Image: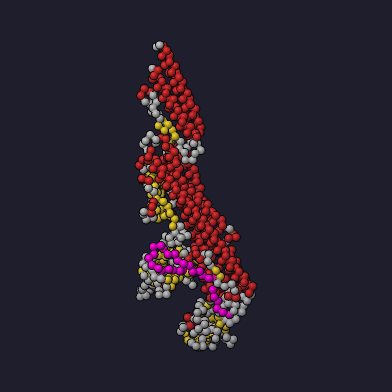
Amino acid sequence: MSFNLFDIASSGVRASSELLQTTSKNIANVNTVGYVRERTEHMTMIDNQVGRGDTYRLLNEFAQKQLNRDTSNKTFFDQFVTEASRVDTLFSEESNSLSTSVNSFFNNIQESLNQPSSSVARSLVMTDAQSLIEQMDRLSGIVIDQQSVVNEQLEIFSDEANNLIQNISTLNNKIAAVDGTSQESGSSSLYNERDKAIRDLAALIDIETLDGPNGSKQIYMGTGEALVMENGTFNLFSLTGDPDPNFKELKLDVQGGKAVPLEVDPSKLKGKIGGLLAFRDDILVPAQNQLGQMGLALADAFNQQNHLGMDANGQLGGDIFNIPTVEAFNYQGNSNNATMTATVQPGHGSELPASDFIITYTAANEVSIQPVDNKGEPVGDAAIATVPASGIIDASSIQVATAGDPNATPPIPPTVQDSFGLQLNVSGAGSEGDKFMVKLNSQASTSLELATARPEDLALASPIRTANDINNTSDATISVGTVTDVSGFSGSPLDLTNGSITIQKTAEPDEYTVSDGVNSGTFNGTPPLSNVLAQAGNGFETYGFDFNIEGTPALGDSFTVEFNEGGFDDNRNGLLLADLQNGEMVRQNVVSGEKADNHKTFNQSYTGLVSDIGVVTHQAQTSGAAFTALAEQSEAWYESLSGVNLDEEAANLLRFQQSYAASAQVLSTARAIFDTLLNAAR
């Protein structure tokens, strides 16, 4: 009996010792990050003895996977909100407002209209034009700085992810080596270290885990791509920029570069990396493109209107702003030596959407022009254009989409594809499949410049002036005229610097004669006369300007149009320059319905940009708060199952101490009985 008692007491002491060791280990690791608490359980053996204990980790894999998913979502919005809030604050600052600069610029144009001959008033306009460019450059600089920050953080985070992927693969190999052996129960630190690495990886990207052979874990991205596979193989992230080296794209390379890199869809990533890419695609890219688009639309519209006026030196107006020309990015897979530059086709700035473009050779002398959104996805239909011998592709090169049918009832006009306001200049030969990316908007946002700093170059006057003949007997009057093209002002058939156009009523009831001293023509028109030169025809409609005659002219009444030589205190073209502030010059969408309002004013466009940044940031803050609450709830659930509770461990420690003491007392009693029996037998 004493022998059985001795054995029972010995197994009890051993079992209590194992329980105390497990409890002590739990208490010692209460502050160890990633530690999963352990429990030791014993089975009853023969003769009511306690067998050797099995120690295992208290882990609920469902709770662990849920925590990893919620961690990915939380860190995604944390990263996005951190970056977006900074840009939102900077753009909403009144001192950074582009609208303030635009308003100041046009207000000074309005002031100059009161004193068209004042060089001081003109100087203020040019000063504000330079300030407007500098303000746009500052805002673009903010965006570019943030893009640099994104690239730097992407490098850091991708390196962290690669290190974690390699570490998980290494730990898988170590765990597989002890799986099913006697050393498995003592290798819990390997499992804890691997679980922590998986959770750290989940903070960077969205992942899913699957159980592999021999205790290993296979890791997949949320989009399905494999990161850690069987037998210790793994894939790693790489950052490349094709075609733009400054625009980093995430790719997945098989170890050793033995397979073609996989494209990673950034819109489906979570974690910090996904938050960075979403911030870049949803905030930075649209902001940079819209800033450049506004600058190009304003510069082009102002230049074109200034061309239609006359400056302070009595010359036709020229460019006030330099429209930049940018280099297109060649894709690495191009097989030929073609290069390409892009700019705005003069007079077509309002057709430019806030997007990038992919130009693809569809044949040796034909290209498609495809707008793409902020994620690089095609938007709307591509335009097809021929590549002329000059290499200059513009609206005249865009092919007609449908021929139409003039004989139909009603007639169907031809459909011309959208040129998107681009002018491309191609050098060298391209091959079918060669591609280029044009980032005109984003590159132009920091490269706008003034073409002149001379106040005299501001064309406030109109190049024509009209007059009623002093001998007219009726109260009919000629309008001031509207100029649409000045290309004919310095050559045949019209040269207003040497002559004038005369319009005279030559017969009743409504016959009029138009003469410029070289050409003449007669037409019939019913008063009041609108667009007189267009009605006259005979080549007069091509002169680039027109006018109306209000009232009913009497027989013999005549009216003249002549070059506005001197243009002293004339502000008629200046009025049109000032009115550009209210003109809807900025295109909103690539695809739009026929009746949709697809253009906004400069101020409306900038206000929309600031509003969009604010809305996206606020939505991210709201979603971030929700996912933070979910992550906290998941972590509390996970910790309640796998975390160390000191109160519980303290109670276990006291219980196991008492059990150990009791077993030791039984052992002492058994020894005393055994000694008594030995002494009695002597």
Is 164 on the left or on the right of 129, as rendered? left
Residue 574 percent across, percent down from the top left: 58, 74
- Way the structure is coloured: secondary structure
Which residue is located at x 38 percent, y 67 percent? 336
Secondary structure mostly seen in the magenta stretch: loop
Which residue is located at x 39 percent, y 24 percent? 49
Residue lying at the far front of the rendered structure: 682
> Is the C terminus in the top left, top right, bottom left or bottom right quadrant?
top left
- Report how many numbered discs are placed on residues in the image: 0
Residue 466 percent across, percent down from the top left: 56, 82
Residue 334 covered by magenta stretch: yes
Residue 79 percent across, percent down from the top left: 50, 51
- Decide which of 618, 409 is in the foreground and name it: 618
| Start-end of magenta stretch | 314-342
Q: Is residue 447 visible?
A: yes
Residue 481 covered by magenta stretch: no
- Decide which of 51, 292 is in the foreground and name it: 51
Which residue is located at x 47 percent, y 37 percent? 643
Residue 329 percent across, percent down from the top left: 44, 64
Q: Is residue 295 visible?
A: no
> Is the N terminus in the top left, top right, bottom left or bottom right quadrant?
top left
Which residue is located at x 55 percent, y 54 percent? 86
Q: Residue 107: which quarter of the image?
A: bottom right
